[in-house]
Amino acid sequence: MRALVLCGSGRRDGFTSAMCSGAEDALREAGWEAEVIHPSELAISHCDSCGGCFGGEGCTKRDGMDAVYEAFSEADLLILSSPVHFSGPSSAIKIALDRFDWIWHMHGFRHPALAAGLVCGGSDVPSFRCVLSVFRSFAAAAGSEWAGDLCLGGTDRGDREYFRRRSGEFTQELLERAGGRR
């Protein structure tokens, strides 16, 4: 079984990255192959609605998204992760998700059976609603079943190790609930 963790953090030492590391560790401990991709570290062009994907062959741009597309097509589980930025997902993950516009024009492509979300925010009770709306909409468009999410507040004063541990626990529970589904 394979998992893709799409990490929307702009920093490797941030809370979102800690959550992704916790998920990756839990996946590997369960015998899964796990790949964490940081879109902020890839050269990814914005979707400019060129229409090249309308022919059903996928995005026609060749850039850092090629690695994301390949990992996506091989994954059984997709974990989307982002900090809350102005009530929405980070620009790093949003630019990557927007480049999947071709999924509306393709049928029969391989996609992860399950998708889940890891989201964190600065205040004790941030609003996760908009981030989860984007993540769930993406999963639905891709044909992936939404398997759940972990939303943690308090990054303004929090402990990264707590976020890492909670994410690992969530991922372990997610895998137990999902069983061996594909």
Image (cartoon, grey):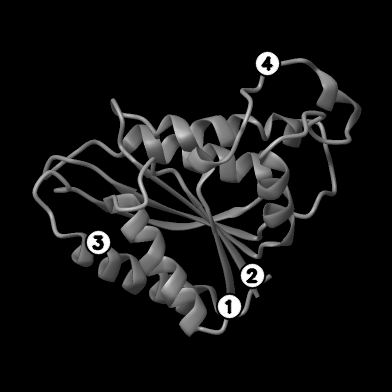
Mark 1–mark 3 Cα distance, whole angstroms, equals 21 Å
- Badge 1 element: loop
- Badge 3 element: helix
Residue for point 42% across, 75% down: 25
What amino acid is labelled 1 in the image? Trp
Q: Using residue 156 as the reference point, say whether residue 119 is left or right of it.
A: right
Q: Is the C-beta separation of discs 2 and 1 under 8 Å?
A: yes
Q: In the image, which disc is placed on residue 32?
A: 1
Q: Is the C-beta separation of discs 4 and 1 under 8 Å?
A: no
Residue 178, relative to residue 42: is it above or below?
below
Classify 10 Å Cα crowding around label 2: few (below 14), some (14-19), many (20 and above). some
Mark 3–mark 4 Cα distance, whole angstroms, equals 35 Å
- Badge 4 element: loop
Mark 3–mark 2 Cα distance, whole angstroms, equals 23 Å
Q: Where is residue 106 in the image (x, y as percent from the top left)?
A: 83, 37
What amino acid is labelled 3 in the image? Phe
Residue for point 40% across, 59% down: 20
Task: For the N terminus, give its image quadrant.
Answer: bottom right
Mark 2 lies on residue: 2
Q: Which of 55 and 157 is in front in this view?
A: 157
Q: In the image, which disc is placed on residue 48?
A: 4
Mark 3 lies on residue: 163
Residue 181, relative to residue 113: is it above or below?
below
Q: Using residue 84 as the reference point, say whether residue 53 is left or right of it.
A: right
Mark 2–mark 1 Cα distance, whole angstroms, equals 6 Å
- Counting residues from the N terminus, which is met first, the one under dot 3 or under dot 4? 4
- Badge 2 element: strand
